[in-house]
Image (cartoon, coloured by chain):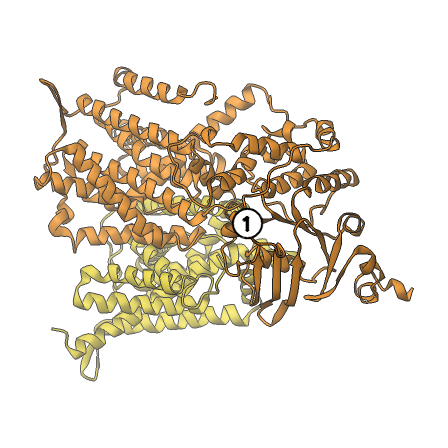
């Protein structure tokens, strides 16, 4: 039943969805690492990104423009949410922060439901990426290759921002010791707003890119949120490389298991997470004793 | 309150449950809505013990709710069992067992990790129920035909029907559940759970097996969830698969927060608000699906402005209206008087496990701690004799705190061994070391900040009275033998008797420092380590505390790390000097004062001057 081309194409599927998961998870990890806040609205932001892309696509007719406009929109959403709500919670316990972002997620989902209804919407892939690409013995949907490429580029950009810019240096320092960064006289307020914006954008951007592959519904985010959590637990919290590795691992697990029986793919993901927790509680690339 | 009228809350609950069918219809509550509120309320009791009391925010309760519900429903609908009550019980036990498994996984991490893992668990259970197990659970269709119970007493038979008839059955279940829960939160275990919520590190350091207690809370919550899940099937005559969805967990969390956490009745109130608002918004205002948005906004607003929920808010209101009757600024004089009087009370040292042993109390050999490339401590030998008062001094960064943390097994040494009463304790857990009679007070206060002075000392004394772990969940805390005396004696020793009822937040700094020492003392250590007990004190507080240290050293062995040289040279019989992570010198105060190495390294090179 499992043929060689089938297997290879599932490996590619896993890579593509894994790269997207990696992107979403890096957003979550950057936010947690810098702000110390676990963003339970992350799945909702992924979903909102998809809808933003949908609106922008239908307004402009250009897929690329939709991606750019949608991503910028998500930066603004993230920054506003941080400025208005999250900021009040830095001094409160983790549990309160979690409850807050959980509530924000629900409000976002229900706002979208109010605006667009519960019916599924779809964004067509751009004309230049429609159809299939023959790859030797295997024929593969072109857009999925594009997804892999876009996610790869986005991760590379995120890497450059994190490791090659002043902002990135502050973010990475913040992950190590946010109190110290504040004491060094860096304008933490603005950095935090920007970081939350970038984190939200990472999720939203993935949502837009993913939109042509799936159907949009307001509840799209919840299963992504769970997968993102598993990715972060597997990779190690606060670790950007961990998020990427975890994302790819999770993508492959989902994809390869569903080749055998789709009903077990999420379960298998959880089994692997449990194994990691038992054998290496801090995650594959996490540092012991943190968080 | 509960001490004078021990069954007040229970009585009021019973009264409320009996009156509800007569009052609520006039408020346009349909019986089915009330029944749902009761089930959510019961479900939430367990969650409140987990979240409100223990501080563990779980989004995975739906997994256990569904497990209990489907086990009971499966047994009943397949005629494997005829007694509804027995099936509910089996479902409850099944959920509790699932809780053990899930808890063992989720509790491997704390804080945000715990929350994330529980989210994943909830989703996984849903997937498992929905696909691989669909032959048993009915998949997306659920299990129809769950029977209602009937009761036979003699010739009388009561078959539970729908509506208000079902209400009486559910109300009885709720009442039993709340009575059990009240006993649990008033038991020693309940006190320890709140301690874990407020300061897990300290709860461990005073000698409680924190992990085991957390798992206990998780399993208790699972049992409540499983019972409620079973009742859901009975109430609806159908076990719905959406009991397993993540939304169920989310709704439980939101209802609990809206009603108020750490109050047991919060989830019931929250469910009442939630369900009546839903009906009102949906039908009354004709908002249709937008009701969820309104409730989401209400939830966010509550989190921002009224975190303690409706019950917490109401309690705060009552308190501020009844005039701030709390003696916030309290008799500072009384405290010093108590201290000035020679403390006649002395808490007996811990029972010995080593009757025949006559060597040093503590013996450390070659203690080394390396962080990354940096050696915080290197090759330190350290011996303390019975009854000694040892001072440990050293400039900032000499490695004193690391050294202390290794001695109490808070951090494992990179190399070296530690012997306590001749027993090798290297690698032990800090709670076990405390149980053996070795504990420390902290340089930075580690108190249970949301509790009173009395409750703080109780938590520490409980560890001494009950050992590492004990499941006396149904015993009243004031029935623990010797507990009260021990707390009273400890408070008298540190001069906080008059302040027993005061919340920690209202204490003066010096008083907090003394409470910090009291927490260590209440464990009845044979060897007590004090990490900078005089740090940050005013001259008067300092004098008092030096007197306190003189009092508590009777019958004990003490090691004190301190920056206050005068105090160390006044108190200690022998002094160990650490410098750059190594032991520089050791001897009597006079020897240390005369030691030229010490003078150069530490006392500012006096000899050169």
Callout 1: SS: loop
Residue B365 drawn at (x, y percent)? 61, 65
| B219 versus A171 height, above or below | above
Q: Residue at x 24, y 47 (%)?
A: A118
**Can residue B559 be spotted in the picture?**
yes
Chain letter matching colour yellow:
A
Chain B representation colour: orange
Give the number of callouts: 1
What's the chain of the residue with tag 1?
B
Q: Tell me which corner region of the image, top left, top right, bottom left or bottom right, holds residue A104.
A: top left
Quadrant for the C terminus of chain B, please. bottom right
| B491 versus A214 height, above or below | above
Q: Is B340 positioned to the left or the right of B237 in the image?
A: right
Q: Is B128 positioned to the left or the right of B218 in the image?
A: left
Q: Residue at x 58, y 42 (%)?
A: B524
State the residue lying farthest toward the right.
B609
Q: Residue at x 75, y 32 (%)?
A: B340
Residue B159 drawn at (x, y percent)? 12, 24
Residue behind mark 1: B355
State the residue lying farthest toward the bottom.
A136
Q: Residue at x 19, y 80 (%)?
A: A138
Residue B549 drawn at (x, y percent)? 71, 42
| B515 versus B128 height, above or below | above
Q: Which is nearer the eye, B18 or B416?
A: B416
Residue B511 drawn at (x, y percent)? 67, 36
| B206 versus B400 height, above or below | above
**Can residue B240 be spotted in the picture?**
no
């Amino acid at each position: 039943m499992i043929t060689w081309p089938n297997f290879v194409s599932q490996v590619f599927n896993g890579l593509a969805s894994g790269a997207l998961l990696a992107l979403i998870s890096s957003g979550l990890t950057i936010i947690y690492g810098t702000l110390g806040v676990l963003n339970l609205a992350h799945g909702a932001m992924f979903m909102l990104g998809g809808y933003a892309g949908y609106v922008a696509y239908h307004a402009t007719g250009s897929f690329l423009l939709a991606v750019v406009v949608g991503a910028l929109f998500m930066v603004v959403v993230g920054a506003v949410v941080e400025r208005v709500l999250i900021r009040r919670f830095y001094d409160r316990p983790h549990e309160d922060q979690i409850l807050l972002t959980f509530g924000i997620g629900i409000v976002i989902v229900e706002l979208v439901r109010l605006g667009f209804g519960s019916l599924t919407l779809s964004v067509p892939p751009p004309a230049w990426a429609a159809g299939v690409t023959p790859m030797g013995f295997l024929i593969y949907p072109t857009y999925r290759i594009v997804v892999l490429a876009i996610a790869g580029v986005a991760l590379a950009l995120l890497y450059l921002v994190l490791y090659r810019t002043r902002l990135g240096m502050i973010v990475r320092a913040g992950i190590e010791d946010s109190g110290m960064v504040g004491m060094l006289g860096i304008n933490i307020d603005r950095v935090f707003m920007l970081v939350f914006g970038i984190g939200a954008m990472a999720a939203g951007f993935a949502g837009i890119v993913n939109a042509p592959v799936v159907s949009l519904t307001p509840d799209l985010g919840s299963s992504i949120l769970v997968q993102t959590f598993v990715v972060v637990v597997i990779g190690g919290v606060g670790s950007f490389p961990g998020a990427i590795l975890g994302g790819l691992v999770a993508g492959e697990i989902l994809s390869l298991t569903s080749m055998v029986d789709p009903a077990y793919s999420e379960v298998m993901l959880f089994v692997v997470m449990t194994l990691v927790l038992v054998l290496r509680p801090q995650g594959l690339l996490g540092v012991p004793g943190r968080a | 309150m509960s001490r004078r009228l021990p069954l007040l809350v229970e009585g009021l609950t019973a009264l409320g449950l009996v009156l509800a069918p007569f009052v609520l219809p006039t408020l346009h509550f349909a019986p089915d809505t009330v029944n749902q509120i009761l089930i959510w309320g019961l479900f939430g009791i367990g969650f409140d013990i987990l979240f409100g009391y223990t501080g563990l925010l779980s989004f995975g309760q739906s997994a256990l709710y569904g497990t209990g519900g489907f086990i009971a429903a499966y047994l009943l609908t397949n005629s494997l069992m005829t007694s509804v009550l027995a099936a509910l019980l089996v479902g409850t036990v099944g959920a509790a067992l699932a809780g053990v498994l899930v808890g063992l996984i989720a509790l491997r991490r704390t804080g945000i990790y715990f929350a994330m893992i529980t989210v994943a668990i909830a989703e996984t259970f849903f997937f498992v129920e929905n696909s691989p197990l669909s032959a048993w659970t009915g998949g997306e269709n659920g299990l129809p035909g769950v029977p209602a119970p009937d009761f036979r007493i003699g010739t009388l038979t009561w078959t539970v029907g729908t509506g208000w008839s079902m209400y009486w059955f559910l109300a009885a279940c709720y009442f039993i559940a709340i009575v059990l829960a009240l006993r649990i939160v008033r038991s020693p275990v309940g006190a320890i759970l709140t301690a874990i919520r407020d300061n897990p590190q300290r709860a461990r350091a005073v000698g409680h097996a924190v992990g085991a207690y957390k798992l206990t809370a998780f399993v208790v919550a699972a049992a409540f969830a499983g019972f409620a899940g079973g009742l859901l099937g009975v109430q609806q005559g159908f076990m719905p698969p959406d009991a397993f969805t993540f939304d169920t967990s989310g709704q439980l969390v939101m209802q609990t927060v809206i009603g108020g956490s750490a109050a047991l009745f919060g989830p019931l109130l929250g469910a009442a608000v939630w369900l009546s608002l839903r009906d009102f918004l949906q039908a009354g205002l004709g908002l249709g699906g937008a009701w969820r948005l309104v409730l989401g906004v209400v939830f966010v607003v509550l989190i921002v402005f009224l975190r303690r929920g409706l019950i917490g808010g109401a309690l705060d209101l009552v308190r501020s209206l009844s005039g701030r009757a709390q003696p916030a600024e309290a008799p500072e004089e009384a405290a010093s008087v108590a201290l000035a009087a020679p403390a006649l009370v002395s808490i007996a040292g811990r029972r010995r496990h080593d009757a025949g042993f006559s060597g040093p109390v503590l013996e450390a050999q070659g203690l080394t701690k390396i962080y990354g490339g940096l050696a915080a401590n290197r090759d330190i030998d350290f011996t303390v004799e019975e009854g000694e008062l040892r001072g440990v001094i050293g400039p900032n960064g000499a490695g004193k705190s690391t050294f202390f943390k290794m001695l109490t097994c808070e951090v494992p040494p990179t190399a070296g061994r530690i012997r306590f009463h001749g027993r090798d304790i290297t690698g032990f857990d800090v709670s076990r070391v405390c149980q053996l009679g070795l504990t420390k007070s902290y340089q930075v206060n580690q108190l249970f900040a949301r509790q009173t002075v009395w409750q703080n000392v109780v938590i520490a004394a409980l560890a001494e009275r009950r050992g590492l772990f004990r499941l006396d969940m149904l015993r009243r805390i004031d029935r623990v033998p010797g507990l009260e005396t021990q707390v009273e004696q400890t408070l008298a020793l540190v001069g906080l008797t008059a302040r027993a009822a005061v919340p920690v937040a209202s204490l003066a700094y010096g008083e907090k420092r003394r409470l910090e020492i009291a927490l260590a003392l209440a464990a009845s250590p044979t060897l007590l380590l004090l990490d900078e007990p005089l740090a940050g004190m005013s001259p008067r507080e300092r004098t008092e505390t030096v007197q306190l240290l003189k009092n508590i050293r009777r019958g004990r062995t003490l090691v004190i790390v301190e920056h206050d040289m005068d105090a160390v040279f006044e108190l200690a019989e022998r002094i160990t000097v650490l410098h750059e992570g190594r032991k520089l010198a050791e001897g009597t105060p006079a020897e240390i004062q005369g030691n030229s190495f010490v003078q150069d390294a530490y006392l500012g090179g006096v000899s050169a001057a």
